Image (cartoon, rainbow, N blue to C red):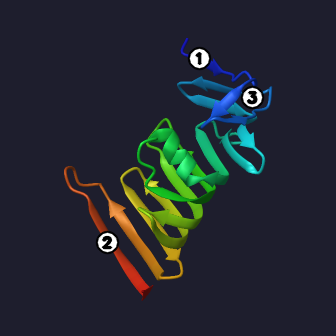
Amino acid sequence: NETYLLKVIPENIVFNNQEWSIPSQNSILYTPEYVDIQEFEFSRGQTSFRLESHPSDKTDFLSLVFNQIALDKLIAFLNPDNPVASGTMNGTITLAEIFHGPILGANLTINNLEALEIVLGDLDAQIANNDASVYEGEVKIMGPDLDVNLDGTYDMSQEGKASFTGTMNLNKLA
């Protein structure tokens, strides 16, 4: 039986030297064909990261919800020596059909985005795939010195080859 149950004890949860909380009834139940996530949300003030399963009958669905996440803190958690970007992230990433070729959906914003100490502005990204190897997306960045829109398709369907087809509108570059 490959059934796993994960629960986080809601005491002394520390990320980047800051205390976070999680509801006491949190759980993730995983089987090879089913995921059920209950109250799995780490929070600190207005900042939160939540992992969800579908509320109805979809047993192969995951959703990650970000609310006021400091990008530099997240990067520091993953790469403490070189935080290359900062900003405040909000949005949702969904994965459907996770057991049989995941279908991705992302709706993310990053306000006050800076990368490599360059102020870029606000980023808005909408990305989706209906096929495990073809992604379509629209990314917009609007800031004091930059206004760019990128629409396109990233295709990895041919073995050993990947291609990007799209349109970039550079409205402002100062």
Q: Which mark is residue 165?
A: 2
Say if 105 sits above or below 6 in the image.
below
Taking the spot 54% from the left edge, 69% from the top edge, the residue there is: 123
Taking the spot 54% from the left edge, 15% from the top edge, the residue there is: 2
- Disc 3, disc 2: CB below 8 Å? no
Say if 9 sits above or below 44 in the image.
above
Q: Quadrant of residue 58?
A: top right
Percent coordinates x, y for residue 59 in the rendering: 63, 36
Taking the spot 73% from the left edge, 21% from the top edge, the residue there is: 9
Judge from the rendering whether residue 60 lies leftward or rightward of residue 103; answer left or right: right
The amino acid at mark 1 is: Thr
Q: Earlier in the sequence, mark 3 or mark 1?
A: 1
Q: Residues within 10 Å of mark 2 (few under 14, many from 20)?
A: few
Asked whether residue 55 is in view, the answer is: no
Q: Earlier in the sequence, mark 3 or mark 2?
A: 3
Q: Which residue is mark 1?
A: 3
Percent coordinates x, y for residue 62 in the rendering: 60, 41
Q: CA distance from mark 3 to mark 1?
A: 17 Å
The amino acid at mark 2 is: Thr
Q: Residues within 10 Å of mark 1 (few under 14, many from 20)?
A: few
Q: Residues within 10 Å of mark 3 (few under 14, many from 20)?
A: some
The amino acid at mark 3 is: Asn
Q: Which residue is mark 3?
A: 26
- Disc 2, disc 1: CB below 8 Å? no
